[in-house]
Image: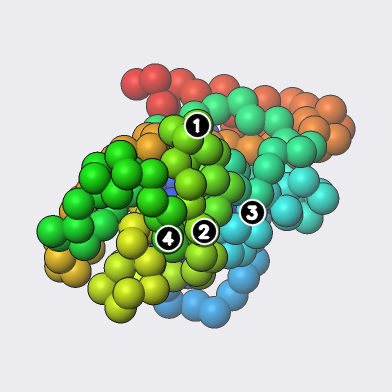
Amino acid sequence: MITLALSKGRIFDDILPLLKAAGIEVLDDPEKSRKLILRTNQPDVRVVLVRATDVPTYVQYGGADMGVVGKDTLLESGTQGLYQPLDLQIAKCRISVAVRDGFDYSAAVRQGSRLKVATKYVAIARDFFAAKGVHVDLIKLYGSMELAPLTGLADAIVDLVSTGNTLKANHLVEVERIMDISSRLVVNQAALKLKQAPIRRIIDAMAKAVAA
Ligand code: PRP
């Protein structure tokens, strides 16, 4: 049995065509059912639904053989014990710094004042501002980052930007692009040895579909 860990939402929707290219079709619809283990058309392949931030943990400790996870999540959680064979080029977005429209970010940085930055991506933000030599106080949030500059909780946020609609709707502007993000295939290293043939087959088929 091959167990694949996926999270609901964009990654799930975007991975379906790549799974199909590998001959795998998910038979249950996670939007219609409360099941956490989904069947596929392959009797020896199943999908488990976990929170995006839990995908690396499931794969690292063997709760799943493989998983699909954003580079943002991988950078935050670390990649110990994970083999990363493939950039799947799906769920593409970027991590950026954003501030309230009208906030003079470059002046704040130039003056060397301590910036209050709210984010779910504490490790990424810490590395980014440290490399720039900007002093920051990081405030860890778990969602709705956009509210932080609007309520005075923070001067800036570090968050995912895709279309930019969420920023615009909340009168925020993107002032720096930290990095591009896409989803990666991650594989448990022991599973790669023990189930080498079926896992290789899936990786190779997905790699071909990504290249096409
Ligand atoms: C992300 C991010 C922004 C939004 C950006 O949230 O935190 O809120 O998407 O997308 P846009 O630029 O297309 O508007 P997501 O929906 O992934 O949920 P989250 O709040 O759990 O991070």
Amino acid beneath label 1: Ala
Amino acid beneath label 4: Lys
Residue beneath disc 1 = 131
On the question of residue 14 being in view, the answer is yes
Q: Residues within 10 Å of mark 4 (few under 14, many from 20)?
A: some
Which of the two labelled residues, at mark 3 and mark 4, occupies the earlier sequence position?
3
The image quadrant that residue 48 belongs to is bottom right
Horizontal and vertical percent position of residue 191? 81, 37
Check disc 3 and report its element: helix, strand or loop. Answer: helix
Pointer 3 with pointer 1, Cβ within 8 A: no
Residue beneath disc 2 = 138
The yes-or-no answer for disc 4 within 8 Å of ligand 1 is no
Horizontal and vertical percent position of residue 169? 15, 67
Check disc 4 and report its element: helix, strand or loop. Answer: strand
Report the Cα–Cα distance between label 3 and label 1. 28 Å
Residue 7 located left or right of residue 11: right
Which of the two labelled residues, at mark 4 and mark 2, occupies the earlier sequence position?
4
Residue beneath disc 3 = 55
Which of the two labelled residues, at mark 2 and mark 1, occupies the earlier sequence position?
1
Q: Disc number at residue 116?
A: 4
> Which residue lies at the image location 82% right of the left edge and 50% below the top edge?
61
Pointer 4 with pointer 2, Cβ within 8 A: no
Report the Cα–Cα distance between label 4 and label 2. 6 Å
On the question of residue 44 being in view, the answer is no
Q: Residues within 10 Å of mark 2 (few under 14, many from 20)?
A: many
Q: Disc number at residue 63?
A: none
Relative to 84, does residue 115 appear above or below in the rendering? Answer: below
